[in-house]
Image (tube, grey):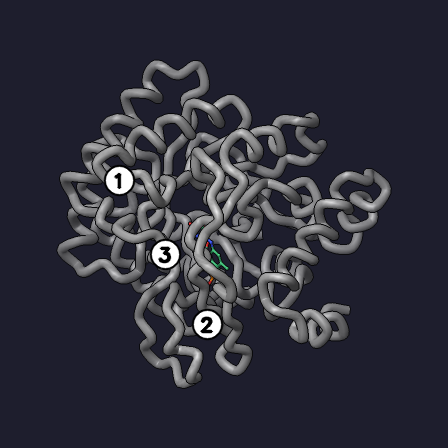
Amino acid sequence: MYQLLRPLLFQLDPERAHDLTLGLLRLAGALPPVRGTLRRVFAPQHQSSVEVLGLTFPNSVGLAAGYDKDGLAWRGLSTLGFGHIEVGTVTPRPQAGNPRPRIFRIPEERAVINRMGFPGRGADFVFSQLSSAPRPPSPVILGINIGKNKDTPNAEAARDYLALMEKFAPVVDYFAVNVSSPNTVGLRRLQARDRLEDLLAQLAAARRWSPFPRPILVKLAPDLTDAELDDALGAVMDMGMDGVIATNTTVKRQGLRSPVREENGGLSGAPLRQRSTAMVREIYRRTKGELPIVGVGGIASPEDVQEKLDAGASLVQVYTGLIYRGPGLVREIVEGVRGAG
Ligand SMILES: Cc1cc2nc3c(=O)[nH]c(=O)nc-3n(C[C@H](O)[C@H](O)[C@H](O)COP(=O)(O)O)c2cc1C
């Protein structure tokens, strides 16, 4: 059915198409009979659970951050068969993000460039979305991806992350610390060893005293050099973090032919796949398989999932693949992957 719907959606500006889809999913999530129907159509018929981070994921495939930034539609999204959903990136205060247009499709390369810049309604709003009704009766794992406001200087970034952790700990299952989006000026500098150690030490200390000590993952950029990756992993391991998400979007344009390559922003989808898999493999090797890895970047088939799992990922996430393949992709990849579902 998505084959029919896609040309219509692709006639719309990408952000409008996204908002429309999200609005429909939000509506669906609020109506139990529709939720049931969606689940019957989309949920995998067989899946195997994954024990990692001290949590039981119903399957290995999750929704990557950025799709449901404000937690508007996560109940509807949970009917599509995801094992986990990562809401966000959420920032403490509302902010507008970059001027539009800020999402660009590249259909011939199954890719997207975005420079959203964390638009969102802020932590209070997202909290109300996550907590206003009981969790749906499905075992989906709910994560939240946290970031700093654009106007918070890096020297004070920890305060933003700490506030978000404290606020959301009672209502989510895990945190993803976003220090890798290319669209907030200076954010990626938080991946440098000293800065990351300082930030993660504060998060670790806050968690020690929290009544809701949730697992914390750190989301990394695919553009780190080997030395930068070593530094970031050193900080993650030394500070007792639970895992990493590899990777965010890339600022590189390797192998991309479309003139859209000139747009500023982060590239996702098929052209990112190999780079992010290489990074998963490298992280697995450098951490001797001791650090759980969530593999994300360019997944659009069961083979792509298998590639990430073979490289050492315990879980995977998708975003751009959904734009090109539609919601049926989740069931297809959960059911189609050996050992993953
Ligand atoms: C439009 C768009 C918005 C995104 N927003 C976020 C975000 O807010 N936070 C984040 O950590 N990643 C964000 N991402 C990155 C994705 O979570 C993912 O890491 C990346 O797109 C690679 O996966 P993919 O190739 O399956 O899309 C965004 C990606 C896209 C395409």
Q: Residues within 10 Å of mark 2 (few under 14, many from 20)?
A: some
Q: Amino acid at mark 3?
A: Asn
Q: CA distance from mark 1 to mark 3?
A: 15 Å
Q: Earlier in the sequence, mark 1 or mark 2?
A: 1
- Name the residue carrying label 2: 270
Q: Amino acid at mark 1?
A: Pro
Q: In the visual, does 178 lie left or right of 71?
A: left
Q: Amino acid at mark 2?
A: Ala
Q: Earlier in the sequence, mark 1 or mark 3?
A: 1
Secondary element under disc 1, as helix, strand or loop, is loop
Q: Tell me which residue sits at (51%, 44%) in the image.
A: 120
Query: In front here: 224 or 70?
Result: 70
Label 2 residue near ligand 1, CB within 8 Å? yes
Q: Tell me which residue sits at (46%, 72%) in the image.
A: 270
Mark toward the viewer: 1 or 2: 1
Secondary element under disc 2, as helix, strand or loop, is helix
Q: Tell me which residue sits at (17%, 50%) in the image.
A: 230
